[in-house]
Every structure is written in C-alpha cells, then in structure tokens.
Image: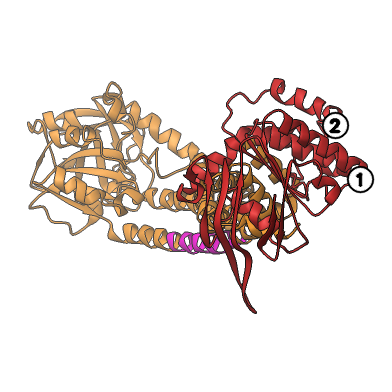
Amino acid sequence: MKIKQLVLRELFQRNNQLISSLVAVSLGIAVMVAIQSTTYYSEKAVAGELDALGANILILAKDATVQDYYGADFQQSEIPESYVSVLTNSGLQGLDNLSPKFSIPVDVGSRKATLTGILPRNEFKSKALWQSTLGVFSKPQNCGVIANIPGITDTTKTRVRKRVIEDLAPDAMLVGADIAASLAVKEGDSLTVLGKRFVAEAILPITGTVDDGRLFAHLHTVQKLTKKDSVLHSIEIVGCCSAISQGLIRQINKLLPDAKVVTISQIVSTQIRANTVMKRISLIMLAVILIVGGASIANYMFANVYERRREIGIYMAMGANSSWILKLFLLKALIIGLAGGIFGYILGSILAMFLGPRIAGVAVYPLPMYAVYSVAISTIIAFAASAIPAIKATSVDPSLIMKED
Amino acid sequence: MLQAEHITKTFIRKHGTVTALDRVSITIKDGEFVAIIGPSGSGKSTLLLALGGMSAPSEGSVIYNRDSVYKWGVSQRAQWRATQVGFVFQGFNLVPYLTVYENVSAGLALSGEKDVTENKIIPLLHRMKIADRKDHVPSELSIGQQQRVALARALVKNPHLILADEPTGNLDPETGTEVMNIIKQQHEAGKTVVLITHDPAMAKFAERKIRIVDGKIVDNN
C-alpha cells in the first residue's frame, strides 16, 4: 500500500468536500483562463488593426527631419543599406516587416513625382530571416493579424498585393493612384523616368497618403539610375505593437546608434494602455483566485485533518513520522492542484471560445501555454493553502485519539 | 526489556491539573506477558501510550533495552514503533476506506518493508481467518473480524513488543477468547505482550498482572 494509493483512495471515498473545493479552484482558474484567452486574442486583433495602418517604425539618418510621417523617407541624408542586414540578423523579436526605401524627385511627362525604390519579396526568398519581408504594402505575418478574423483580415486584398510585389521586375513600375490619374497611365503602359523605360505593372489603389503621388520601382534599379549604390533614405518597419511597447525602439536604437528611430507614438500608447488594463484585470482575477480558491482548499484541508485525527494517530502508532504525515496531505494538495488546474483550463478555454466572439468580437482558441500556467497557479495555491493544515496534522496528539475510544 | 521509571503524566484541564500517572515504575522482561488491570480512568491507556513512545511522560523515563525512549528524536521513536511495536486498540481503528488487505499492507509498508507482497499478507489473513474478506472494507465486517484485521495489521511486521489496549473490550466473550488466544500464541512465539484490560477473565491469559488505581501501581506481582 503506497502513500499515493492511500491518498487517491481517501480522495475518492470522501469526495463531497473535495468536489466543492475543486469546483472553487476550477472556477477561479476557468475565469482567469477565459479572461486571459479573450484578452490575448483581443490584443492580437487590436494589434492587427493598428498594424494594418502600415509601417509604424521609421529608420532615418540621424539629421533627418520628420514633419510628415508618411513622407519622412523623402530626405537628403542617407543611411547605409547594410542596416537592413544588421536588423534582419539581429534576432530582435517583433520586427515583422522591413521595407528599405530610396526616394528621389523625378519629372514624368509634365508632372513632378517621387520615384521610390523598394525591395520586392523575390530578392529575399533565399534568406530565411527575410521571409516575412514583402515590401512597402505588406502586412505583418506573425504578431498582428490572425488568419480569418471576421472584419479584420482582408485576405483577398493581401493576396493581390503580394502577387504584385513578388512579381516586380527590374523594368517594372508601380504607379500611385493620383499620378496615374493625372498622367492617364493604365496597367501595361510605358513610362520613361530618368531616361529609362518602365512598364506600369500595376496602378495602386488610393491610400490617401503621399504614396498616391509616387512611382515605385526596384530599389537597385533606382540606386543604379541615380548612381547611389548601397544607400537608402529610410527603412520602414512594421513592428509588433506589443514588442514596441516592450522596448523594441530602444533595442533598435542600441543596434543602430547612428540612425534616427521614430515611431507613431499614438499607436504604441494605445496598445500600452490596452495591455495595462488587461494586465490589471488579470491581476485582480489572480487575487480573487488566491483568496477564494485558497480559502476553500484551506477550509477543506483543515476539516479533513480534523476528521482524520484518529486515522493520523493510527498511522503514528504504526510508525509514521512527521514527514510521512506531511507528505500524505501535501500529496493530496498536489492532486487537488493538478485537477483544479486541468479542469479550470478546460472550462476556461470553453468559456472563452463561447464568450469571446460575443463579448470581444474576436474568435478565441485554446492556448496550450495557459494549461501550464493554470496547473502551476492552481498547484501553488493548493500547496500554500494546505501547508498549515498539513503541519497541524503532524502535531496531532495520539493520546487524545485514544480517549475517543 | 521495557521499563517505566517513576513516570508521572499530568494533563492541564479547565478545572485544573489532572494527574493520570503518579510516579509509576514497572519492568517488563523480554518475552513476558503482562496484563495491566484497573478500573476505568485509572491511567491504564495513558501508561500504554507512554510505554509505546506515543506520549511523553511529564516526569520520569521509559527505557527500552537500556535506551531512554523519549531521549530519541521523534523520527527515531516513529522508526522504533514501525519496526518493533505492534499496537492493538479496543476500537480497532481500522482505516475505514481501505480494504482488509490494504489495512494490513499499510502496516507493513509503514514499517519500511520494501517487499510488500501478497506472500507476506495472505498467509497471515488465513491464520486470522479473514482471507476470504480481504477485499472488504471494515464496515462490511463483523466486530470480531475487524479486531482480527487490527491484530493482523499489528502482527504483519513481526514486532517484538505487542501493546494491546482492551483488545476484547468490544467483543462478545467467545470472540474475545479467540482474539486472546491469538495474542497468547504470539507470546508463546517469544514476543513481549503488554495487555491493558479491566476484564479479569482476559487478564488470566497473562503471566503477570499489574494493578493500577488512580494513576498509581497498587499491585505488581
């Protein structure tokens, strides 16, 4: 008869109190898991919406000025193209998309425009760390957008853009909506810029930004035309908002001390605020679980020790020492903790999947990492709540047990 | 040899201090069968607990083979009980949610025996005539069967010292005699037995009787 069997047998024999205690812990864990899971996907959705606005970090030359965020790449000062590889090889988390740019003013027909050199995806295909780099219009792949969240992801549009960027050839050009309209350029038409003939690969949709008045060609084509090899005016980064809030800008500054790193502060602060609120709610829930769940288990364990005084005395008479008695109750706490964590996680995940779309408007799926957290928290609570009753059990006076005979 | 040397045990109660044992001294030789007799509340059970290392006396000492039992650490005393002492109680004190087999095997497991196998338990259950009830819980057994399980639990580890507190107190005379015969067989096998009883018929099984009244030894022959 091993102590483990003894604990299990006792648990199943006297399960009324156990069930109420287990329900209290499981419910606490379930509520926490449900809130955390919904928060996680809600944050993702918010981040996705924010990231869908476009690049949120700009890397410029140190002396560059930023009067207009969307036109900030149009600078006199240059930065080395090697910054791109420094960033991609740095291992920094939260850099979802890098978009190096080189922009110069050009005359197209009777109009003045900006020719911007960009790197299309096909150039990055052979470099594993650059796989997510799609170019200036791409969306983040890892942190921002969850596939098929209704109302957030527009997969059709994304596919069209990917196709255009991936297929951009050395003599191909993307034409901003505004300039295309004023020059009456259609897809497939020819354009001569800086003495080189380009084919309008696509007319870009209206964005409401300076991009509408721009022409986009391959970065290296533009650099060659202007005889400015290996330099850029800017690197646009789509950074995960959560990573930005956790100090991504500071890390980039450290990595590129000679560059200026700017971000859209409103976006970041919005995300930080959302994160802070969610974290506070989680902390409150954790406190509730600690109090309610812990009190329930402690109450159960105290009652259990009282109820089993005679049994404890018998074990002592049979030769059980204090550590054995302690183990008897702490093993029980461990089982309650594990069971509470597992039940709580399952229940919480189901709750989140059911309530998430109705309350937060996002699809929620079970997060395996929360199973680990649930079990860990539940077990710690069970242990902490059982410690005093278990110690009390070791000091049961066997002579009192004899008197009850 | 087991000795009590001038042991006094007092309890502090609401109404004042109660002296359960008053400078009690007894000597029990190896292999001896001693009955401690006396009326209810005379201090018999308190003496048994003190002799068994379960309740430290307020004064005096308990000596087992020249070692002072209460100078040992708690763990060492527990180890001594686990290997050398078998307790049998009036109320049987079986673990209610364990089967007969499990109750007995728990006694063996707590003794530190690594090899807790059926080979060691089943023959004993046969000797105690409870093998056919091995999968039953105590509430499914008769009173006599429950006491036989309690005896089996105490004897399974082959203890040198058997401390029995009114083992027949809840049994009818016939069943009580059966249980006493089992205890007598243990004595005949060389074990030291201390029997607490207020029943003169059961005390007759012992070689020597010690009478205790109001916490004092009044007869020690």
In the image, what residue occupies the spot 62% across and 68% down?
B19
Is the residue at mark 1 from the same chain as the one at mark 2? yes
Q: Which residue is mark 1?
A: B173
Q: Callout 1 environment at 10 Å: few (<14), some (14 to 19), or many (20+)?
A: few
B107 in relation to B47, above or below: above
Say what secondary structure mark 2 lies in. helix
The quadrant of the image that shows the N terminus of chain A is: top right
Left or right, A190 with respect to A230, comes to right
Question: Which comes before the other along the chain, label 1 or label 2?
Answer: 2
Q: Is residue A151 shown in magenta?
A: no
Does residue A109 appear in this view?
no
Q: Which residue is mark 2?
A: B133
Residue A361: image quadrant is bottom right
Extent of the magenta region: A279-296
**Where in the figure is residue A330, as x and y percent of width and height?**
55, 47
A385 in relation to B118, above or below: below
Residue A119: image quadrant is top left
Q: Which chain is red?
A: B
Q: CA distance from mark 1 to mark 2?
A: 22 Å
